[in-house]
Amino acid sequence: MSAIVTEELVTAPVDPRFPNQNQTRYCWQSYVDFHRCQKIKGEDFAPCEYFQKVYKSVCPNSWIEKWDSQREAGTFPKKI
Amino acid sequence: MATWAQIGFQNSASPLMEQLIFFHDHALLILILITTLVGYFMLSLVTNKFVNRYLLDGQMIEIIWTVLPAVILIILALPSLRLLYLIDETTEPSITLKTVGHQWYWSYEYSDFKDIEFDSYMMPSNDLEKGQFRLLEVDNRVILPYLTQVRLLVTAGDVIHSWTIPSLGIKADAVPGRLNQLNVFFNRPGVFYGQCSEICGANHSFMPITVEAVNPADFLSWVKSF
């Protein structure tokens, strides 16, 4: 019984930094990495989009909304 | 799903649950053998009239009843450990499904392709159609493709809930502020049911989980139709 793999179904890959059941940090780190990447390389830098794809797949939408508003308000608890 | 007067597990829908059932049968076989043997010993000891006044020790039998239980424990522990790590094993997933527990419903998010997000409430008993299951049916079912590795991320918005599908052999607590990962792999199509498994308030019993496993091609057309 082998898995069906189609090109249309692609998601965030398994990250060896987060080998446990707890994937909270995978979401958080990808979110921070994306915004740091954009800050350093500029908004149009395509390779940054990888992090965005990962955090969009892994983070609950409510978390993303909360962090976005925190960044706008300048209360995001991490230096970007 | 569970049926009336059911004694064993629900039918399995994933390789993991198959293994869990095998382990259960293996453990039960050992348990039944021990219980019958010990039961027979006890019965035969209290019903006979033999006396042995000069019994002090018996090296051989003591060695046997020390070593044999140790061996039995090992043949229980090793498959158990194998299964424990098998459940934790991560294979490269094809899609990610996020589920968020709320008081008192589940909401689901598919964010790999489009932003699909919906809430899944229990169907009230008087809205049920013929053949639907009371307290298990929901208004919006989770649709997932079979024969596809799915990463399921479980979290909660308010209090601790617990997401489970017994047919898949998976269960994880939904904790606010934490993402718990489960591996889902259906080996057949079907509709599978589960219920919130962590007391979460007044309507804890009324936030069931219904998953529909469909053909990957049908899944894709469902995604596109959203």
Image (cartoon, rainbow, N blue to C red):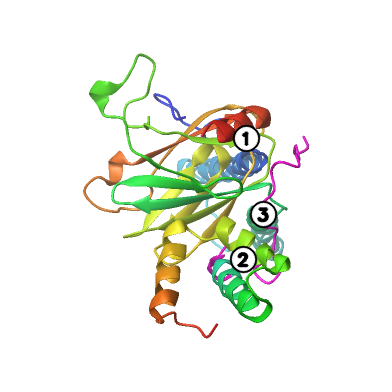
Mark positioned earlier in the residue sequence (1 or 3): 3
Give the x, y percent position of residue A6. Answer: 75, 39
Question: CA separation, marks 1 and 3?
Answer: 41 Å
User: What residue occupies the far top of the structure in this picture?
Assistant: B130
Q: Is residue B110 left or right of residue B148?
A: left
**Residue at 78% across / 37% down in the picture?**
A2
Query: Please, which chain is the residue tagged with disc 3 on?
Result: B
Give amino acid for label 3.
Ile
Q: Are marks 2 and 3 on the same chain?
A: no
Determine if marks 1 and 3 fall on one subunit: yes
Badge 3 marks a residue whose secondary structure is helix
Query: Over which residues does the magenta segment extend?
Result: A1-25
Q: CA distance from mark 2 to mark 3?
A: 31 Å
Disc 1 residue type (three-letter): Pro
In magenta stretch: residue B89:
no
Instruction: Assess disc 3: are there few (<14), some (14-19) or many (≥20) residues with their C-alpha within 10 Å of its C-alpha.
Output: few
The answer to the question of whether label 1 and label 3 lie on touching residues, with beta carbons closer than 8 A, is no
State the residue at coordinates (45%, 82%).
Answer: A77
Chain of the residue where label 1 is placed in the rendered structure: B
The numbered dot on residue B145 is 1
Task: Look at the numbered disc 2 and give the secondary structure of its residue.
Answer: loop
Q: Foreground mark, 1 or 2?
A: 1
Q: CA distance from mark 1 to mark 2?
A: 24 Å
